[in-house]
Image (cartoon, grey):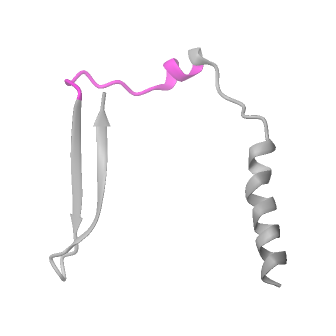
Amino acid sequence: MRQVLAAALAAVFLAGCAVDQVNAPDAHIKAVRYHHDAPPSLTLFTMVNNETDKGAHSSLMINA
């Protein structure tokens, strides 16, 4: 039973590799991108749980 399930899962995951990737044209990407005038920076945000004062999760904002 495990082998059948493993084979089915492998087929599902590998099916995504067979699909042609369709990308937007470069002109469209440049037209909708966000650009900030500030200098390039990396900002690390750490969310803290107010009840336990422990870090819950972190995120990274990249301004490049």
Q: Residue at x 72, y 31 (%)?
A: 22
Residue 5 rendering spot, x and y as whole percentages: 79, 76
Q: Residue at x 58, y 17 (%)?
A: 26
Q: Is residue 47 left or right of residue 13?
A: left
Residue 34 is one of the magenta-drawn residues: yes
Residue 2 rendering spot, x and y as whole percentages: 78, 82
Q: Residue at x 15, y 76 (%)?
A: 53
Q: Is residue 53 left or right of residue 20?
A: left
Residue 3 is one of the magenta-drawn residues: no
Q: Which quarter of the rendered picture does the N terminus lie within?
A: bottom right
Residue ranking furthest to the front: 3
For the record, the magenta segment spans 28-40
Residue 52 rendering spot, x and y as whole percentages: 18, 82
> In the image shown, does 7 or 26 lie closer to the viewer?
7
Is residue 20 placed above or below 60 in the rendered structure?
above
Residue 46, by quadrant, is bottom left
Q: How many marks?
A: 0
Is residue 11 placed above or below 24 in the rendered structure?
below
Is residue 63 placed above or below 50 in the rendered structure?
above
> In the image shown, does 45 or 19 lie closer to the viewer?
19
Q: Is residue 38 left or right of residue 7?
A: left
Residue 64 rendering spot, x and y as whole percentages: 31, 27
Residue ranking furthest to the top: 27
Judged by its main secondary structure, the magenta piece is: loop
Q: Residue at x 76, y 72 (%)?
A: 6
